[in-house]
Amino acid sequence: MGITQLNRRTLVQGVAVGAVGIHALAATNSLAQSDTTVKIGVSEDGYRTDERANVGFYPLNTGIFESLVHLGEDYQIKPLLAESWEFVEPNTWRITLRQDVSFHDGTAFNAEAVKYTMDRIASNGGGSMGLGADSCVIVDDFTVEITSSRPNRRLMQQIGHPNNSILPVGLNPAESRIGTGPFKEVEYVAGDHFTVETNAEYWGDDKPEIAGITFNFYPDPTARMLALQAGDVDMITDVSRPAAGQVEQMGATLLRSPVGGYEAFYIQIHGEEPYHLGADPAVREAISLAIDRNVIVQNAWQGNAEPGHTMIPPAILGDSVSIVAEPTYDLEKAKSLLEEAGWTGDDIRAKDGTALTLTIINGYGTAADHGTVPEILQAQLREAGIDLQIVQTPDTATYEQRLSLGEGDLWLEAGSQNDGNPGFLPGLLFASPEEGGDPESTMYGRAFAPGAAFDEQIEITNNAVDMAEVQEAAALGMNLLINEEHIVVPLCGFFRMVGASEKITEFSLHPSGVNQRWTSLRVKG
Amino acid sequence: MAVSTADHKSPTKLAKPAVKLTAPERFILLKQLRKDTSALVGLVLLSVIVVMAVFANQIAPYDPIKTDLLLGLTGPSRDHWLGTDSLGRDMFSRIVHGARWSLGAAAIASLAIVVLGVSIGIIAGFFGGIIDSLLMRLVDVLLAFPSMILALAIVGMLGPSLKNVLIGMVAVWWVDYARIVRGITLRVAQNDYVEAAHCCGCHPTRTMIRHIFPNVIPTVAVLATLELGGLILAISGLSFLGLGAQPPTPEWGAMINDGRAFFLNAPQLMFYPGMAISIVVLACNLVGDGLRDALDPRMRSR
Amino acid sequence: MGSFILRRVMLLVPIWIGISLLAFLLTNLTPGDPARLALQRELGHQPDTAQVEEARERMGLNDPLPIQYLRWLGHAATGDLGTSYRNGQPVLEALTNRFPTTLKLAALGLAISVTIALPLGALAAVFRGRVVDHFSRIFALVGASMPSFWVAYLLILAFAVNLRLLPVAGSSTWKHIVLPAVTLGIAGSASLMRVVRSEMLENLGQDYVRTARAKGLANSYVISRHAFRNALIPVTTILGMRFAGMLGGTVIVETIFAWPGIGKLIIDAIFDRDYPIIQGFVIFMGTVTLLINLTVDIGYGLIDPRVRPAKS
């Protein structure tokens, strides 16, 4: 070890080795194997074994189960176990099933299995599709009709969600996992690993070319990264954004998906004192103008995100994406807007004795999901004379509790789209709250809903049959939220990242993790 | 953290010196300490860190939470002696201010623990009877837990924050003090001068403060110094898990947690706060050992 | 002997009741309404007021606290600690599933700390003031001063990433346990070693050792057969407490090394606000600790009859 090489890292290593008193003789790679089983380091073991989890494998997707349709990487749905489907007025979808599919245990896939699965979802609350006990009707062995208990023309976009994967009749996925997918379960050890092998009988054209996959759980992102470097695994998912550069430094490849997730904050417009300042349109527009997304991307995420223009993934809007204008960064304009609106002052602006102090609530999904973004926002808004107080809520539940009380001005959220319905998130969060609806279930609407003009677009996304029409309405709604009302300030679009060792030669990464298909994995040898 | 947990409930020999120090004895104590090189080293280290904590604003060249987005992850330089973290915050300033958070939090917890433990111990020992039985049953129950388990549960119920971590620590760690102080009180209360004070109609509070409390001081001082290190480890451990100090607070455990993401390309982000914790705990242990040796004649003979 | 054990067990009953009371009261520290939280987890969205009221009634949260406690205690005594908010798994099942994994780690951690501490502590006492003594003192001080989460990363860097001798994290093979156990062991050995040293010193100064030496017995024989064996007795008794402490100290190590034990479970539960798990953890670990102490007491009574109360 030459003097020049004695950097801090070797120093740390030296300390570690010295402390235990073991001398390095030779570096041996104990895990070099040339089989075609792929080891993938994933984060938490999120496998749920309770009755309420619809199929029990969400959110860890192991390729065992399949849904009727598949959400493509462009967020458009493609046939999977369903061959075709048509809408029957007033509210029914008639679905024709594939006839050449069987489950891993040999039983045939047919309308009975679909009915069993849909009834199970109905008995667990109906899911996003709003299914009731009588929703699914068998027409013949390979045809079913599904009628939601509420008007629902987006059912086919929703039914592809892996939560709605098809189970063989009578299966409780908490006990065993038997699906139609390209992989079969070998072993599941809770908290440690989930091993699957390739299903030699797989019905699809994209039969896996690898022997199988072992998913190892590493909740600690650093340990996951180190596992890749040490050669314990061939690939890791959920690479930490700020630290992703290390993947390439260690000689592995960093793969990126299209954008599927987002980070944005919403400004409360219906708040009561002291959370009422967002009601002023000038304040909202100034906030929007004062945010420099490139700095957030470069700094908080070390370049591993894209400046965000919409909230939902751009791809889901199809050609209509151009309707949503890109928000601009213009600090001078932000300042002059505030001046005109009467917010003046050298340091923190004020109007009629009220200081322009806003509170940002950081905690959805968790505060940790947003890294240093709140601090950067604080610094940027300060430039425009806006004082930002940061409140961290440790988890979603506390965040929502606070939102239901309306105690905050800016609400920082990260989310992702996992089905193909463009109107789902905007409608859920920003549609006007139901008259007399329970206060707890309408908290987003009560804080943020812009009103009739937006609700009209959401109506169209719910009721139009033509997807192009749905996309256009969703885009118009998003544009209204972002560029006219300035209620939503998109910050970043998130793509997924995996780190892959040189063993992996090919892999197509889906923007939505739960919709990932592992059949595209190719390895050396 | 495992250490502190283990240490916490081990049989202790600290209950021995239940004597009031006279002036010459205090002098001997100082002399003893001065002869003890390692305790002296500990004392110097600890003083340096305390000075760092108290004068953090004067010592630190930069604001520890001020970000400089153009200066992320730089190595040591003339401007930034220990380099900067991912947000361009000066690591040296963060370490200096970290002394205030890490040592300060432990000191506050320690003070609360001592006040609670000593009061309960003296009250139980002095009054005896039903008060004593009730308090000692509570002590028995709390002693049935490894300290970290109950502290974790309390933080879990209250929610993660540095304040709640301190509450959890105090709620659990006072027991040892109460038990030991009660033992000393029981012995001292039999002394003639205490009984005399009592018979003369001296108010119980006065008796407790004037006659019993001074006897407790040496033992409690040793115990508090020895356990300060353990407290620092425990608090920084909980902060490391994300249960304690929240970002951007420059608490050392939280800084190690922040630095984890950059473990491979900037290990110094973890190395410096780790060293800082190790040094301050080491200093506490050295001073605590020295104090114990000086106050415990049995140890002194070795 | 039978009556001795019985007496010991009877002593534990009030303490166990105290533990259960503590575990029960802990729930009252939670901010927010447990019924609302449970419902929210169940439904996936905020429940309405009527639903919450109905759930409060169903969960018995409207009853007076003592009634609630007795009902809860009745359930707890039969092993029903409720179900996890997160995944609906019975709490006792979740705890007992994870416990053996933690037990294994803590046992090996303890074994490693004993393996380091016994010889080092004994040698330090025998060669008091010599190099070994200084080395062991420095080792003890440094070992007790380093945060375990920091040591863990140093070990990973050295043995997993650089030397590639051991896996980074996980639990599927025997190799996976080495680094977490060593991390625990280093921390535990430091303080244990000092106890061994001081016990040895005490015994070496005793009359019987001087007598044995005076009889002309070889020094090594005296040290190993007399002093060391007698020093072991008090050391053994504190091992029980150490073991219980280590069970609580695995939390950080389990998180870093992805060791699916009870410590990892409780950390997840804390971040998920899974209160039934946290509550169950308290009563479960309290009970386990009581049992460990009982075992140590009885074992000690078997070894050393002086501890047993005289028949009267």
Image: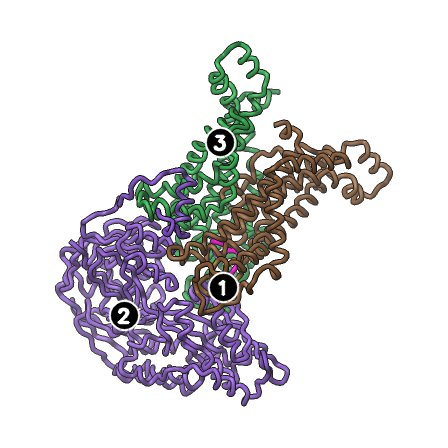
Chain colours: A purple, B brown, C green
Tell me the chief SS of the magenta region.
Answer: loop
Does residue A340 sit above or below C248 in this rendering? below
Same chain for marks 2 and 3?
A: no
Chain holding disc 2 = A
> Looking at the image, do the residues carrying marks 2 and 1 touch, with CB atoms under 8 Å apart?
no
Q: Which residues are magenta?
A: B240-246
Which residue, given by chain and number where applicable, does mark 1 sit on? B89
Tell me where residue C16 appears, x and y as whole percent.
Answer: 54, 40
Q: Quadrant of the C terminus of chain C?
A: top right
Type of the residue with mark 2: Ile
Chain holding disc 1 = B
**Closer-to-camera residue (A302/B7):** A302
Type of the residue with mark 3: Thr
Q: Residue furthest top?
A: C215
For marks 2 and 3, give the CA distance: 57 Å
Examine the structure image and report whether residue A23 is included in the region drawn in magenta.
Answer: no
Which residue, given by chain and number where applicable, does mark 2 sit on? A159
Residue at disc 2, secondary structure: helix
For marks 1 and 3, give the CA distance: 53 Å
Residue at position x 63%, y 34% in the image = B293
Type of the residue with mark 1: Arg
Tell me where residue A237 appears, x and y as whole percent.
Answer: 31, 59
Tell me where residue A349 appears, x and y as whole percent.
Answer: 58, 81
Does residue A173 sit above or below C103 in this rendering? below
Same chain for marks 2 and 1?
A: no
